[in-house]
DNA sequence: GCCGTGACGATTC
DNA sequence: CGAATCGCCACGG
């Protein structure tokens, strides 16, 4: 079969399924793809995601619930605003409330 | 087919 | 809780 799709494309495919109002982690996506140790590669896929792909990459955070670095989105503040718009709450440490919004494929 | 890279994860101090 | 370290895996050159 012409499965020329790379690991990246698979990541985007699953990341696009994250329900609105929820978030997932890089490690969770990696596990869903069968590579639990490829969390870093998942992060790469997000960074390599083409702009305007409608990929909800702002719903992907790390295991600690921390947001993306400054170089992405134009700043964590932007990402945080997007998440708050979807009803996502944060703790006093500025991290996503994983207990309430963590979603695993 | 080896080397460097990186939006991570878990552990340790 | 915060900072630092090691390991892991896929991609590009």
Image (cartoon, coloured by chain):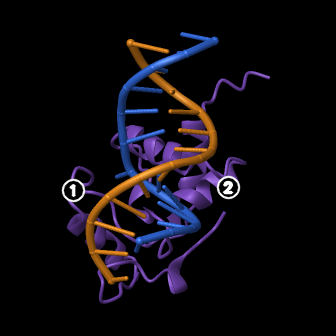
Chain colours: A purple, B blue, C orange
Answer few, some or many: residues within 10 Å of disc 1's Cα (few below 14, many 20 plus, some between 14 and 19): few
Q: Is residue A93 left or right of residue A26?
A: left
Q: Which residue is mark 1?
A: A70
User: Which residue is located at x 68 percent, y 48 percent?
Assistant: A33
Q: Are marks 1 and 2 in contact (CB under 8 Å)?
A: no
- The percent position of residue A35, horizontal first and vertical second, equals 68, 47
Q: Nearer the viewer, residue C6 or A46?
A: C6
User: Which residue is located at x 41 percent, y 50 percent?
Assistant: A54
- The percent position of residue A99, horizontal first and vertical second, equals 53, 85
To which chain does the residue with label 2 belong? A
Q: Is residue A39 above or below residue A103?
A: above
Specify the quadrant that holds the N terminus of chain A: top right
Q: Report how far apart the C-alphas of labels 1 and 2 lie in the structure.
A: 26 Å
Q: Is residue A72 above or below residue A78?
A: above
- The percent position of residue A23, horizontal first and vertical second, equals 49, 70
User: Which residue is located at x 39 percent, y 77 percent?
Assistant: A86
Determine whether the residue tagged by mark 1 lies in a helix, strand or loop. loop
Specify the quadrant that holds the C terminus of chain A: bottom right
Q: Which residue is mark 2?
A: A31
To which chain does the residue with label 1 belong? A
Determine whether the residue tagged by mark 2 lies in a helix, strand or loop. helix
User: Which residue is located at x 66 percent, y 53 percent?
Assistant: A36
- The percent position of residue B11, horizontal first and vertical second, equals 56, 68
Q: Nearer the viewer, residue A47 or B3?
A: B3
Residue A45's mark? none
Answer few, some or many: residues within 10 Å of disc 2's Cα (few below 14, many 20 plus, some between 14 and 19): some
Q: Nearer the viewer, residue A78 or A64?
A: A64
Q: Is residue A37 above or below residue A103?
A: above
């Amino acid at each position: 079969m012409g499965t020329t799709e790379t690991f990246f494309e698979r990541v985007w495919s699953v990341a696009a399924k994250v329900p609105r109002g929820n978030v997932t982690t890089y490690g969770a996506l990696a596990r869903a793809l069968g590579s639990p140790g490829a969390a870093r590669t998942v992060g790469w896929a997000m960074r390599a995601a083409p702009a305007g792909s409608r990929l909800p990459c702002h719903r992907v955070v790390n295991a600690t619930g921390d947001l993306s670095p400054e170089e992405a989105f134009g700043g964590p503040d932007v990402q945080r605003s997007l998440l708050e718009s979807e009803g996502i709450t944060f703790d006093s440490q500025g991290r996503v409330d994983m207990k309430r919004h963590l979603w695993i494929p």
